[in-house]
Image (tube, rainbow, N blue to C red):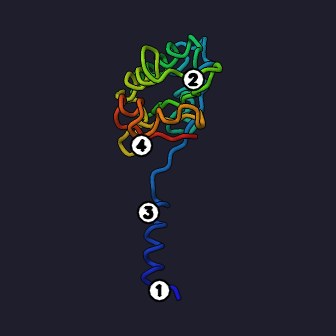
């Protein structure tokens, strides 16, 4: 038999989850934004924010040469707008047919360390948020104690 105490505990737990902050993200394939300027990014951020979205996931792959420039433009635009709109990284770990390098110049670690401290970087529960859909290739890089989290520090990471 279910007790009143059990029902109240279940309702309290449900209320915790039902009232939790929810976020709505746009998915931007940065490789398709080669011609964007900072102004183009500002226009897109304003449109996305006005549509009720909280953040854009910047889908970044390798070895596309325009990625670093466009990510810099996106963050510069978000910072210039001074809004509460946020950006975060969604790594296409095998984009371009080869894994993104974990360390070194133009690596995941250098990228993350450059952006996670920006005011426009999306935080989940106060921690920088990131994602990838690389599946199991090099998954140990993302594990606690792995080379990425060890070098970046605290990161709330979603393996898609």
Q: Tell me whether circle 3 and circle 4 mark residues in contact (CB < 8 Å).
A: no
Q: Earlier in the sequence, mark 3 or mark 4?
A: 3
User: Label 3, on which residue?
Assistant: 16
Quarter assignment of residue 34: top right
User: Label 4, on which residue?
Assistant: 124
Residue at position x 36%, y 30% from top? 152
- Rounded to the nearest whole Å, what is the CA distance between mark 2 and mark 4? 26 Å
Quarter of the image with the C terminus in it: top right
Q: Tell me whether circle 2 and circle 3 mark residues in contact (CB < 8 Å).
A: no
- Rounded to the nearest whole Å, what is the CA distance between mark 1 and mark 4? 36 Å
User: Label 1, on which residue?
Assistant: 3
Q: Tell me whether circle 1 and circle 2 mark residues in contact (CB < 8 Å).
A: no
113 or 145, which is in the foreground?
A: 145
Considering every residue shown, the one lying at the far bottom of the view is 1
Q: Is residue 146 above or below residue 64?
A: below
- Rounded to the nearest whole Å, what is the CA distance between mark 3 and mark 4? 16 Å
Q: Earlier in the sequence, mark 2 or mark 3?
A: 3
């Amino acid at each position: 038999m279910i007790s009143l105490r059990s029902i109240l505990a279940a309702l309290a737990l449900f209320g915790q989850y039902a009232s939790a902050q929810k976020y709505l993200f746009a998915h931007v394939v940065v490789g398709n934004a080669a011609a964007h300027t900072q102004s183009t990014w500002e226009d897109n951020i304003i449109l996305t924010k006005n549509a009720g979205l909280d953040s854009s996931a910047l889908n970044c792959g390798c070895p596309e040469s325009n990625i670093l420039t466009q990510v810099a433009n996106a963050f510069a635009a978000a910072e210039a707008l001074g809004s509460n709109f946020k950006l975060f990284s969604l790594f296409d770990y095998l984009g371009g047919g080869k894994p993104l390098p974990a360390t070194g110049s133009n690596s995941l670690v250098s990228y993350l360390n450059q952006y996670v401290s920006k005011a426009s970087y999306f935080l989940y529960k106060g921690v920088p948020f990131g994602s990838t859909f690389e599946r199991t290739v090099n998954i140990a890089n993302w594990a606690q104690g792995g080379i990425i989290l060890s070098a970046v520090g605290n990161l709330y990471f979603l393996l898609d």
